[in-house]
Amino acid sequence: MEIERVRAELRQAVRELSERGLYSSSKWCAEQLVGLGCPAATAGPSAPPAPADDGEATDALLLARCYFQMREYLRAAHALEEAPGHTARFLRLYALYLAGERRKDDQTLEESASLADSCPAHVANQQLKPIDAELRGLHERDALDGYALYLYAIVLKQLQRPAHAVDLLCAALHKEPTLWAAWLELAAACADRDAIARLALPEHWMKHFFYAHVCLELQQNSEAVTLYEGLATEFPASTYILAQLATAHYQLREFDEAQVRFEELLRADPYRLDNIDTYSNILYVKESKRALSCVAHNAVSLDKYRPETCCIIGNYYSLRAEHEKAVVHFQRALRLDRSYLSAWTLMGHEYVELKNTGAAIHAYRQAVQISPRDYRAWYALGQTYEILQMPFYALFYYRKATALRPYDARMWCALAGCYRLLNRKAEAIRCYERAESNDDREGIALQELARLHRESGNDAHAAACYARNLARRDAQQLEGADTVEALKFLAEHCKSIGELDKAQPFCARLLDCGGPQDVEEAKAMLREMRSAMSRANCSLR
């Protein structure tokens, strides 16, 4: 990677994206520009500004940009009606698109009595068809630049023409490879690695960021860590890469490492709110009330009305078991951004805690509509239907979650539990075996496998599973009902096959950790075995 060429491309991209109102992509490019570190002292001068479009009506464009920055989108579009040039055309059509989006959101809120009601499916952006008509004619004459191709793609995506949209996104990236928003749209449009492999992508350094992002989205988290660590060698000061690494470790359930990364991120960027909702999830899982309280107070002091802030506060109240207050804050997050995926899922969890399964199911369904790749919402739907004792529905949703997260033992254990409820023991055994082969940290799979084999009369397999689970629990210094169950079965099994020397230590342990009835049974078995061994010794004499 030629660092100075990358630096020059990013500088130009920041300027061009800002001129067109693509502020999120502009911010991303600026962050990567700073992430490269300080330029070498011997570096040549930065690239000169790109020339303006021929015939560009500069004064009208300046006025339109002012209107756009004030979010007066229709005024911005009107100011550019007669303005020529690629930049003016893009800003005019993009302003119309955003005006249509805002009106669509307003209508959605007006027609929805509350967040518990379903979103009206008929609400659409009324500017899509006029924009489509104008861009279609220009596209047929090959008169669109990369930015206009990107805008055309997002219009076609909303008009339910996804295949054409993907082709346009690829074409846009060949012309403007630093257009990060186009890369994100492309990632969202591809369901799996096969779809990614079929894309005609430009040979450009931005492709490495794209592949890393796709891996994270597709839950291929170990590969994502490898890719982002490689990018970090070229962009050592990038807070974006650090945030993505923290997120990847979170999705790998490596919470300690993820927390370390997020703390490093906040030291480098203390006024950041992007991704900090994920950090609050980690603190929630670790039950770090004090740390989560500090993060929540800091978020409120930075921007009380950011969706991320509302989500962080919701997590804080949830950890304190104040579920009604948590719901209120997740609802606030969704009023600010109805497409905020985490808020829908977390609000669903709170409704489950409040025993409002209908509202929980609605929230989870909203989440999967926004992102069908969100395994958490599919998994939560399965759990909710399992609570409702509807195992066939639960099975459907658990299968979805397992397909998205095939290396997560929790998904396989949940699926196995459903099969067991339906008395489909063979499928349950296969699922528990998959869970065990995928590092079942909770140790559910081995214990359940042992029980299933015992119920099926396969005592040898049951004994092997109990023994492995007992060894795991001993290594973790765990006691409890599962340990007692394993000891009792192993003692009885060894006794039944005549291995009395192996059975006695299990009985001895039961005397220490079993309940009163278990202790009495262990004593009885020990007496029987000693009597049998005594008779055997007598017969030998």
Image (tube, rainbow, N blue to C red):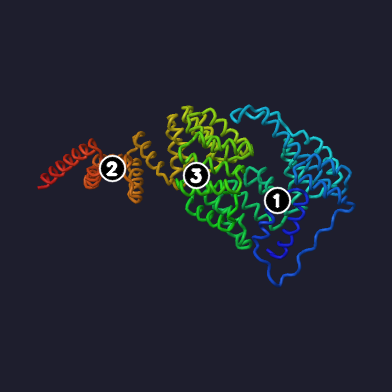
Location of residue 337 with respect to 273 vertically, above or below? above
Give residue 128's position: percent from left, percent from top: 77, 36
Q: Distance of mark 1 from mark 2, alpha carbons?
A: 60 Å
The secondary structure type at the circle numbered 1 is helix
Give residue 84's position: percent from left, percent from top: 88, 47
The secondary structure type at the circle numbered 2 is helix
Q: Distance of mark 3 from mark 1, alpha carbons?
A: 33 Å
Q: Residues within 10 Å of mark 2 (few under 14, many from 20)?
A: many
Query: Amino acid under label 3?
Result: Asp
Residue carrying label 3: 408
Q: Is residue 437 visible?
A: no
Q: Quadrant of residue 529?
A: top left
Viewer-nearest residue: 388 or 317: 317
Disc 3 and disc 1 in contact, CB within 8 angstroms? no
Residue carrying label 1: 25
Viewer-nearest residue: 289 or 235: 289
Q: Residues within 10 Å of mark 3 (few under 14, many from 20)?
A: many
Q: Nearer the viewer, mark 3 or mark 1?
A: 1
Query: Amino acid under label 1?
Result: Ser
Q: Is residue 39 left or right of residue 255?
A: right
Q: Which residue is painted at 64% across and 60% down in the image? A: 35
The residue lying furthest to the front in this view is 301
Q: Nearer the viewer, mark 1 or mark 2?
A: 1
The secondary structure type at the circle numbered 3 is loop
Give residue 53's position: percent from left, percent from top: 86, 53
Query: Amino acid under label 2?
Result: Leu
Mark before the other along the chain sequence, 3 or 1? 1
Residue 487 is labelled as: 2
Q: Quadrant of residue 361?
A: top right
Give residue 344's position: percent from left, percent from top: 57, 36
Mark before the other along the chain sequence, 1 or 2? 1
